[in-house]
Amino acid sequence: AWVAGFNGTDALPGLMWHGHEMIWGYAGAVIVGFLLTAVGSWTGQPAFSGTPLAGLAALWLGARIAASTETGAPLITGLLSVSFFVCAAVAVALPVWRARSKRNAGVPFLLLAFALANALYLLTVAGVLDMDARRLLFTGLLLVSGFITLIGLRVIPFFTHRALKRPQVSHPRWAGIVGLLSPVILAALIATNAPSVLALIVGAAGMVFNLVLLMRNAHGSMRQHPLLWVLYLGYSLTALGIGLVGLALSVAPALMSAAVHCIAIGGVGVLTLGMMTRTALGHTGRNLVLPPLMVPAYALMLLATVLRLGAAFIPAAYQPLIHAAGACFAGALLLFLWRYGKWLVSTRIDGMPG
């Protein structure tokens, strides 16, 4: 809709709508969906399902409708969108509390920070707060990067171990904390307009630590496993984007658009497609064999990344590259929907719950 000419609403005009819906709409749905599924495995508690899950989904859907139709101030959008993340934080916190899972105790607070950034952004757009709305968009996106590092450093090594039958390489706890906190600290620095030199250090550390921790589990044979290499590519692009954000905030502000979309398309787009194509197989009772059309879908999402980065560096071709990138992004997800859609609304083929 964005590349086809939809320009938001009176409440969320233009880029304000596009940024909000990609970060707190699209990425937010994937983050919450993954966490509500994973927290059951992490804590041994029953999965979040039934009427409470339907209510949470209704909050998300209502926020999307309000964001694309609301006039005046984005109050209804804010109420529904922020409530979605607050309720999701509670839904994640309850099993963590019951299981006394110290390792996962910070996850609900990260969701609440995401909700706070959402609220601050919408209050700024509404004119209630005197803050820079674009900086708050970047804050939200970097918090998404925090979720990517949190989830990626847990599941990608495990998926690699399962697929390649190789020992899983663990990483020092302190190094994982550095990898996770770097985008979160960058988010705080952007929101508060903190000194640029610190942003450069944090961004560089985040990029290096996340790449090193990821590659400790990499192996040449994973080239034969698209379900693996797509995750490595997406995570690597996220790490690169974190480094570029630090660079843009310190010495090269012209790089900010490239940094943002390196994370938003290269990280969020590639990783969500890669994760969905893998986890949906297991959660519909199927073998972990990538269906036809999914490697082309990966290629389209990677091409969308290249085209969007090209638009950041070639102003003369900005509009055609933006349209091509948007078409590739949408095309990749439509291929996923074409192949997986029926499975996701049908009973599991193995008869298990889900």
Image: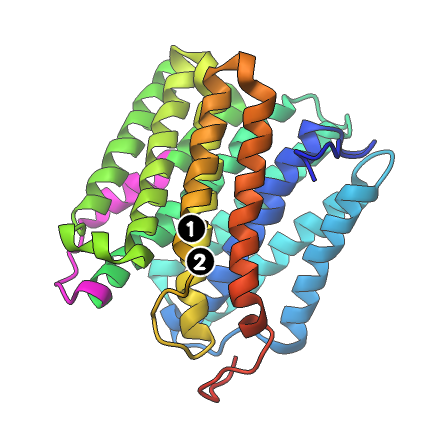
The span picked out in magenta is: 163-182
Residue extending furthest bottom?
351
Circle 1: is it few (<14), some (14-19), or many (20+) Cα within 10 Å?
Answer: few
Residue 347 is one of the magenta-drawn residues: no
Query: Which residue is under mark 2?
Result: 293
Residue extending furthest right?
72
- Give the number of the disc on residue 296: 1
Three-letter residue code for mark 1: Pro
What's the residue at 48%, 15% (across, down)? 314
What's the residue at 39%, 31% (across, down)? 241
Residue 313, percent across and down?
A: 46, 16
Q: In which quarter of the image is residue 251?
A: top left
What's the residue at 67%, 48% (across, down)? 82
Mark 2 in CB contact with mark 1 (< 8 angstroms):
yes
Circle 2: is it few (<14), some (14-19), or many (20+) Cα within 10 Å?
Answer: few
Looking at the image, is 99 positioned above or below residue 72?
Answer: below
What's the residue at 24%, 46% (across, down)? 214
Q: Nearer the viewer, residue 341 or 122?
A: 341
